[in-house]
Image (cartoon, helix red, strand yellow):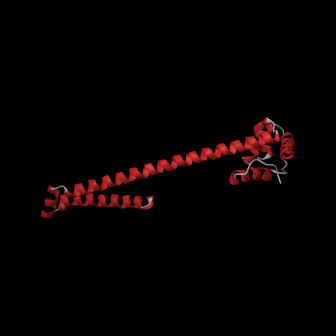
Amino acid sequence: MTSTKRLRLVFYTTIICTVVMFLEELGEEFGGEWFQKWAEFHILATVVMAGLLFTLGVLWKELHKFQKYHETLEDKMQRASTAFEDLLNAYFDKWLFSEAEQHITRLMFKGCSISEIAEIRGAKEGTIKAQTNSIYRKSGYSNKVQLLSAFLEDLTNGESVSGPH
């Protein structure tokens, strides 16, 4: 049974337990002889407790499953982040990027404009433009899109670090 079906079952079981509790209260207030016999054996209370215990079990199982799924996603994200960082560093080493060029490339990949990079680095826009031109010259790519595409292609296809074209 899928998680959605189990959770739907828990929802409906909880509704039934609520209705039974409500009916028990009405029965105590207005009940007849039949209700008194049921009340003696605590049948309704037993049904409600059994239903609630069932829902707790299902919810515990789903929570445990969700926790494992969450841990798996975190692990995958960490591995992807590490792979991307390793790939970046391999390219930076290959192209002999300076620390400044590495920082600027990272900011470019984050989507920062020349003016934003200049502000972040406390530099003039002309300096950043000159450094981005150096990045393109050293890497062999002519713009930010081509440069980022090279990284994404290596990450998605598992190709080794290679130059353009």
Residue 148's place in the image compared with 130, above or below, is below
Q: Residue at x 23, y 55 (%)?
A: 46
Q: Residue at x 43, y 50 (%)?
A: 63
Q: Residue at x 65, y 42 (%)?
A: 82
The residue lying toward the viewer, choosing from 10 and 139, is: 139
Q: Residue at x 13, y 60 (%)?
A: 37
Quarter of the figure with the N terminus: bottom left
Asked whether residue 43 is in view, the answer is yes
The x, y position of residue 163, in whole percent, is 81, 49
The residue lying toward the viewer, choosing from 116 and 95, is: 95
Asked whether residue 32 is in view, the answer is no
The residue lying toward the viewer, choosing from 79 and 52, is: 79
The x, y position of residue 42, in whole percent, is 18, 55
Residue 159's place in the image compared with 85, above or below, is below
The x, y position of residue 51, in whole percent, is 30, 56
Res 126 quadrant in image = top right
Question: Furthest-front residue in view?
Answer: 160
Residue 99's place in the image compared with 5, above or below, is above
Going by the image, does 62 lie left or right of 161?
Answer: left
The residue lying toward the viewer, choosing from 83 and 61, is: 83
The total number of labels drawn is 0
The x, y position of residue 85, in whole percent, is 69, 42
Going by the image, does 64 lie left or right of 26?
Answer: right
Quarter of the figure with the C terminus: bottom right
